[in-house]
Amino acid sequence: MQLDHLVAEALKLSPRSRAQLAGKLLRSLDELTVEQNEQIWAEQAARRDLEPETTDRSAEQVFKELRQQLAWLRELSFHRLAELELAEAAH
């Protein structure tokens, strides 16, 4: 399955389900070796070096996207905190 297709399907999920999925994906990265992490970051750095430094997006669009990402991170943090509280209560 292509990454674009997976992303499109994930975006159809409810915000709570997307946050849960994001949490699971983030936790899965903890299982990577140091070498795997270094490789991923090196590939990302190489991609960014190839990207043009200019953008066709307006400042308004950039700030809108940042606000959306911040809202998503807040929601993810809220759900992660709830998970931790549930785990503590179970002990």
Image (cartoon, rainbow, N blue to C red):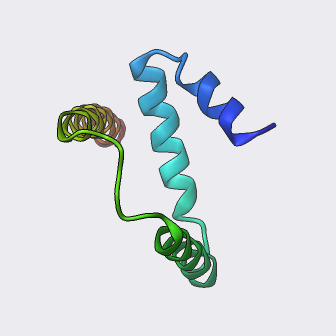
The quadrant of the image that shows the N terminus is top right
Residue sitting nearer the eye, 84 or 4: 4
Question: Where does the image place residue 70, in percent across and percent down from the top left?
Answer: 23, 39
The quadrant of the image that shows the C terminus is top left
* Numbered label tally: 0
Query: Which residue is most to the right?
Result: 1
Horizontal arrangement in the rendering, residue 15 relative to residue 9 (left or right): left
Residue sitting nearer the eye, 74 or 48: 48
| Residue 17 sits above or below residue 90 on the image | above
Question: Where does the image place residue 16, in percent across and percent down from the top left?
Answer: 40, 21
Residue that appears at 69% across and 41% down: 3
Horizontal arrangement in the rendering, residue 87 relative to residue 27 (left or right): left
| Residue 30 sits above or below residue 11 on the image | below
Instruction: Tell me where residue 43 sits by quadrant.
Output: bottom right
Residue that appears at 60% across and 33% down: 7
| Residue 31 sits above or below residue 64 on the image | below
Question: Where does the image place residue 88, in percent across and percent down from the top left?
Answer: 29, 42
Residue that appears at 35% across and 44% down: 56
Horizontal arrangement in the rendering, residue 6 relative to residue 66 (left or right): right
Residue sitting nearer the eye, 88 or 71: 71
Question: Where does the image place residue 61, in percent across and percent down from the top left?
Answer: 25, 34
Residue sitting nearer the eye, 29 or 90: 29
Instruction: Tell me where residue 71 sits by quadrant.
Output: top left
Residue that appears at 22% across and 32% down: 64
